[in-house]
Image (cartoon, coloured by chain):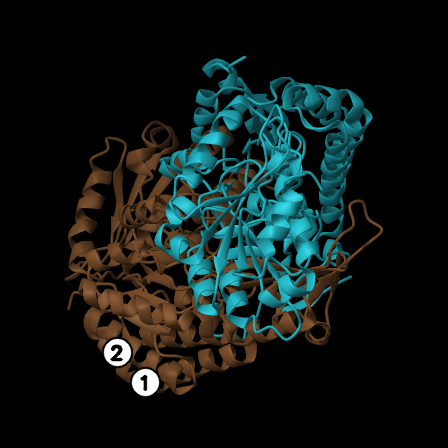
Chain colours: A cyan, B brown
Amino acid sequence: MTTTTEQLEQLTQAAAAAAPVWRRSDAATRASWLRAAADALDAHGEELVAIAHEETRLAEARLTGEVGRTTGQLRLFASALEEGSYLELTVDDADASATPPRPELRRMLTGVGPVAVFSASNFPFAFSVAGGDTASALAAGNPVIVKAHSGHPRLSRRTAEIMAQALEGAGAPRGSLALIEGREAGNALVQHPVIQAAGFTGSVSGGRALFDLASGRPDPIPFYGELGSVNPVVITPAAAGARGEELAKGLVGSFTLGVGQFCTKPGVVFVPEGAGFEDLVARFAVDAEGGPLLTERITDAFPLGVAHLEADPSVTVVAEGRPTDGAQPVVLATDAAAVVDRPDTLLEECFGPVTVLVRYSSPDQLLAALRAVPGSLTGTLHSEPGDDVADVLEVLERRVGRVLFAGWPTGVAVTWSQHHGGPWPATTSLHTSVGATAIRRFLRPVVFQDAPAELLPAVLRDDALASLPHRRNGVLRVP
Amino acid sequence: MTTTTEQLEQLTQAAAAAAPVWRRSDAATRASWLRAAADALDAHGEELVAIAHEETRLAEARLTGEVGRTTGQLRLFASALEEGSYLELTVDDADASATPPRPELRRMLTGVGPVAVFSASNFPFAFSVAGGDTASALAAGNPVIVKAHSGHPRLSRRTAEIMAQALEGAGAPRGSLALIEGREAGNALVQHPVIQAAGFTGSVSGGRALFDLASGRPDPIPFYGELGSVNPVVITPAAAGARGEELAKGLVGSFTLGVGQFCTKPGVVFVPEGAGFEDLVARFAVDAEGGPLLTERITDAFPLGVAHLEADPSVTVVAEGRPTDGAQPVVLATDAAAVVDRPDTLLEECFGPVTVLVRYSSPDQLLAALRAVPGSLTGTLHSEPGDDVADVLEVLERRVGRVLFAGWPTGVAVTWSQHHGGPWPATTSLHTSVGATAIRRFLRPVVFQDAPAELLPAVLRDDALASLPHRRNGVLRVP
């Protein structure tokens, strides 16, 4: 069901026609549209989970949880709209005594225009048609056109159908949400003059190709891509000594969760040499379950990726999990010197249930190897009180977007403070793709100078400001 | 004095070494560094203005004002640091009862790393070495390397010298601010692995070339460019009737200000046909003063740009200003139909004292022509109460970043609410290059999950939060 050029043209024109209605809609109305979409998806949860299970082979319990996360995400953005901070309302009153005299300025954020969303294979709900990019783009006041992931076409169609119907049923205009299919259509979408920004979750190669198209337009548009991440973990000697078994068990659980197909999978783990941590990991890993991978492409790529790692002379196999029809979990090990020498081989993301232990025998070795890690979504530090971790934290803070001090990086809470992003290739930008602030990606500022009150957008008038967070003459005010 | 590859390498290494000190510096310290720079520039104001006048031929009074604006800008960012909202501190407390259990998350914004700044010819202070991009990048906690504009090399060197000395004198590390010269060095700078973001003010061609280099890196970086803007003005028949003389006088003053070399110069003015407005403009324009342009390149380009416009069969000359050694102001006229037909010719920015009046004879004609205007920094509407301007405003809001209802777009107040940006080619991004929020361009989020208090950055600890604006569990709090 590849989308044709003519179909794409119709869909973009419909989005262009819907855009002014979305941009001008007030927050309460837009929140009600988002909630209507969430309610409809919840109501069709069982039907959607069944399709998703068939297409992705992910477990039904996990998929059911993901529906809840997805609709919760839509409702979080509805709340954020009602709260109002996202508008960044800022007023400076006129000051005739200033040199030069200062005009009145009233600033707000407003929708950027129709947004393209490229959905991911590994979260058929939360990072797909109704996922975070779509939710935040709609919340920002923009129609969305989603490029379906080929891994779950039927689910994408049904989700789009339910969501578009719910939006229109709640009063949103035609053209609020559309779906396209096929790589060529996706390439055309990101280059289409109507599209003003794009969100993407997927591979480095796929994301880079689309980023280049977005940046190469006659009028470049922002491209918010989440691409690849190895999510380094550092375990100090003291932590390995004090909690080795718990950490080994936790690591195995995390790198095999969802058959190792999370973007926050811990892919490289710095472990103290000679602390016996590898043996502990091996003990838990032999019982680890693998399973079928999401798509044929990932299924084909996984053994090749593992073989590529194993081909490095420094790499040994620490343990393999239970044999299975699908991917079998595997733990590899190398050392810090090899990582510094060959980061391109040893620190490349390998999607699926594999993790690489990197032995270090001194703080300097650890730091040198850690500095070679590419930008990542997360970095985890397991240390004990009294450990001198200042330098490790300094490197982690520079290389990742989320620094964890307990637990494991898989699992991304959808909250106001969440940040899901990081230096390239984790993401292409300085923004998050998860959490309330994701909305900022699809908003742009506009300021009104010396406007008569009746010509201002309603939220910028004094009566509206009284009940919204805003800054006036430099002072932040909360109603 | 072209910067060599070796020199660039030394400067970038010094910036890389300074970066952690800047990133970790607290707001009060960084504010004191910015104020020290501002004080030093003010103290050397006369010396700097004299050099600037020699190199740019801009009037000394204007240059003196620009120094004040520039140091005021540094001080505005110092205040913004102390106010603390720029950190976007956000905390979600742990919630064990949530499904899945929610960890504690503490989010802040932090410096992105060393920043490249490409300075402009037309504001040798406010958009140059010590200008808004530099001020906001430093405020965000990043060392800066400035590519000097070839139009004022001596001023650039002296400004950098004074500023670097002041920063170091106040306690900032070596490598906090450096200057490079030469196009090749600039191209190398924006591609250098140490550089994490870039700011630019200049031409569409120059900005596009650098944007392409920044986006084409193996690790693309954000490129915040302010490129080109025609700044449409709309005058309704009622406004022309009620205030024609005042508007004509204001327009002539604005498009010839700074010899028409402001990025916010009103370059295209939609005027009602038959309202006699052209005659009024002509009356004031014949007395308008031109003068020498900033650089040889601009001096060569101006008559070519005017000739290019005049070559269009629809274009007539409405008036020419006083003959001068430099550029002579000129007012051209065309009509809305021609603009719709040939926007690439008639709506291209022409730097210098020229503006194009576009006659319209119906609201539909006006809207069609206005929709052809490229993205701009500003859009100005002169209307009278009772005018139906909803459609015009809708187009302006989509096409520009600042909508004015009185006065003229030249003159950009440096305040909390200012927005200096707009759709391509006005700028490359959804951010401003003027005003307090410009700092956001050079910050990236980082979140700490379940961190022991002693390992958190100081501003994220509970005791610091008490005296800073922050959001906790979704609720915005102001101390």
Q: Quadrant of residue A260?
A: top right
Name the amino acid type tagged 2: Arg
On screen, residue A235 versus residue B43, left or right, reads: right
Q: Position of residue A442 (x, y in %)?
A: 57, 43
Marks 2 and 1 share the same chain: yes
Nearest to viewer (mark 2 / mark 1)? 2
Query: For the residue labelled by badge 2, is the local secondary structure a helix, a strand or a loop?
Result: helix
**Could you say which is closer to the camera, residue A92 or residue B21?**
B21
On screen, residue A356 versus residue B336, left or right, reads: right
Q: Which quarter of the rendering shows the C terminus of chain A?
A: bottom right
Q: Position of residue A38 (x, y in %)?
A: 76, 33
Chain letter of disc 1 in the image: B
On screen, residue B435 versus residue A279, left or right, reads: left
Q: Is residue A399 visible?
A: yes
User: Quick one: label 1, few (<14), some, or many (20+) residues within 10 Å?
Assistant: some
Q: Which mark is residue B323?
A: none
Name the amino acid type tagged 1: His
Name the residue tied to disc 2.
B158
Q: Is residue B427 above or below residue B21?
A: above
Q: Residue at x 40, y 73 (%)?
A: B18
Name the residue tied to disc 1.
B44
Q: Which quarter of the rendering shows the N terminus of chain A?
A: top right
